[in-house]
Amino acid sequence: MQTVREMIPEYNANLDRLRQRRQELLQERELEPSFEKRYKLTCRVDRINRIIESTSAALHAMQEYVR
């Protein structure tokens, strides 16, 4: 079992990967000529945004906890 302090770097790394993936999807969406595919990419970006938001909130809570 990891301590909260040990989990923080893992959460940061996950956020970095999520932000990178979001950026990739946004770039892909810009180049996509099909409306349907752009819409699906937009839905994926929205889901990733929600994951990033909740992970960021959890990370903030963990950082407050270890202080």
Image (tube, rainbow, N blue to C red):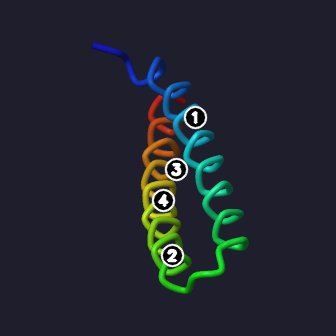
Q: Identify the disc placed on residue 29.
A: none
Q: In whole angstroms, how far apart are the C-alphas of marks 4 and 3?
A: 12 Å
Q: In whole angstroms, how far apart are the C-alphas of marks 3 and 2?
A: 28 Å
Which residue is rendered at x = 43% and y = 46% of the image?
Answer: 58
Compared with 15, 25 (above or below) is: below
Residue at numbered disc 3: 56
Neighbourhood count class around disc 3 (C-alpha, 10 Å): few under 14, some 14–19, many 20 upward: some
Q: In whole angstroms, how far apart are the C-alphas of marks 2 and 1?
A: 30 Å
- Counting residues from the N terminus, which is met first, the one under dot 4 or under dot 2? 2
Measured from the top left, where is residue 59 in percent x and y? Answer: 49, 41
- Counting residues from the N terminus, which is met first, the one under dot 2 or under dot 1? 1
Q: In whole angstroms, how far apart are the C-alphas of marks 4 and 2?
A: 17 Å
Judged left or right of residue 3, residue 24 is right
Mark 4 and mark 3 in contact? Answer it, CB < 8 Å: no
Under tag 3, what secondary structure? helix
Judged left or right of residue 9, residue 43 is left
Residue at numbered disc 4: 48
Residue at numbered disc 1: 12
Q: In whole angstroms, how far apart are the C-alphas of marks 1 and 4?
A: 15 Å
